[in-house]
Image (cartoon, helix red, strand yellow):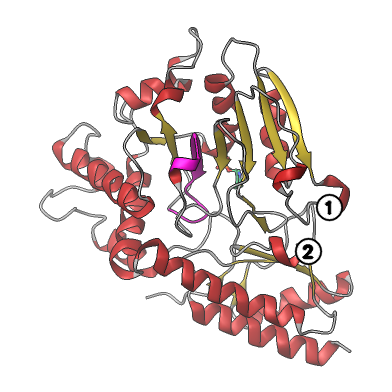
Amino acid sequence: MSERVYNFSAGPAVLPEAVLAEAQRDLMALPGVGASVLEISHRSADFSAILAQTTADLRTLLNVPSGYQVLFLQGGSRLQFSMVPMNLLGEHGQTADYVLTGSWGKKALEEARREGKTQVAWDGAETGYDRLPSDEALALSDDAAYVHITTNETIEGVQFATEPEVGDRPLVADMSSDFLSRPIPVDRYGLIYACAQKNAGPAGVTVVIVRDDLLARAPDGLPGMLLYRNHAENNSCYNTPPTFGIYLVGLVAKWLLHEQGGLDGIDQRNRDKAALLYRVIDESNGFYRGHARPADRSLMNVTFRLPDADLEAQFLRQAKEHQLHALKGHRSVGGIRASIYNAMPPEGVDRLSSFMQEFAAQHGS
Ligand SMILES: *Cc1c(COP(=O)(O)O)cnc(C)c1O
C-alpha cells in the first residue's frame, strides 16, 4: 500500500480507505460478474442492482420519505445552479429567493438570474460571510417559487445547524459539502442537491433529492437532459449515468451504514473532530483567528488566519512535512482551510491540532 498523507483537500477530497480498497480489489472484475463496473451496460441486471442498492442505502441513511425521488445526475453542483431555476421557477412569473451566506450561494444566484426573477433574501457580504441570518432577518417573497440556501459554505466555513424557517415555500439546498455528514429532516426540503466529490464519492456524479410535486413545474421546451422529470421517470438512466460514480457513492453509503453507525454515528465523530480544531483556535490567544462567528462554524471546513501571510506560508510548508496536506485556504479568501469531511480519520485531526499547538507555541505570543 502506498503511503497516504492526511489530505485536508476541500474537494475532490479524501475517501474512506475501506472504500478505495474495495474499489481497487473489484476493479478488474466485480464478484460474480466477471467484468469491471466500468465495462458493463448501465441497463444490465448487474448495474441495475448496484443502482437500486445505492438508492436504497441513501434512502435509509437519510430517512428519505416516500414522495421524494433520488436522482444521480452529471454536471456537478454548478449545473444544478441552472437546473433548479430552469425547472422550478417555471413560467408563472414567480420569484426565487436566495440566501447568500458565501461564495457558492452567490454563484448559484448568478445562474438563477439568467432564468427568471430572483430576490436576495439575505446577504452576508457586509461582514465577509462570517455568519448566518436569523429567521427574522430573512426577507422572503410572499409567493417565492423556492428559497435557496447553501447549508455549508465550503469556502468561508459557515454552516446552518438547522433549517431556516421559510413557511410553505419550498426550501432548496445546495448540500454539496455537508451531504451525508449528519442526519437531516428531508421533509423540510423541496429539493436537495450535492455533487459527490466533497463527502460522498468521486467527481462526476451529483445526487438530487426532489419532492414529487416539484417535478411537474418545469416548463415545456427545456432540453431533455435538463428536465428533472426525465431523469426521475427513467430511474436516472435517461442517458448513460455516471456508473462508476454511482458505484462509489454506493460503497460510501455502505461504509456509513455498516461501519460508522449511520449518520448519527458519523455526525458525532464529525462534531468531535471539529471541536478539537476550534478549541485550538480559541485557546491560541488570538494567534489563530477563525473566520466564522463561533455560533455559525462549519463542522466540515475549518477556516482561519494566522497573524500574517509569511506565517501562513510557513505553516503550510511545515504542515506538509508532517504529512498534513492541502490546507491552503481558497484563493478568494486566503488563510488556512482544514476540510475534515467524513472520511478524514480522527488521527488526522489529532495530528493537525498538535501541529497547530506546536506552531503557535513557536511563533506566537
Ligand atoms: C464544490 C461546491 C460546488 C461546485 O461543485 P461542482 O461539482 O464543481 O460544480 C457548489 N456548491 C458547493 C457548496 C460546493 O462546495
Q: Is residue 53 left or right of residue 307?
A: left
Q: Amino acid at mark 2?
A: His
SS state under label 2: loop
Q: Is residue 265 left or right of residue 46?
A: right
Mark 2 Cα shell of 10 Å, populated few (<14), some (14-19), many (≥20): many
The quadrant the N terminus occupies is bottom left
Query: Which disc is residue 128 wearing?
Result: 1
Res 239 seen here:
no
In the rendered view, tell whether residue 286 sits above or below residue 339: below
Is ligand 1 less than 8 Å from the beta carbon at label 1?
Answer: no
Chain part drawn in magenta? 187-200
Would you say residue 34 sits in the magenta stretch?
A: no
Quadrant assignment, res 350: bottom right
The quadrant the C terminus occupies is bottom right
Callout 2–callout 1 Cβ contact below 8 Å: yes
Ligand 1 in which quarter: top right
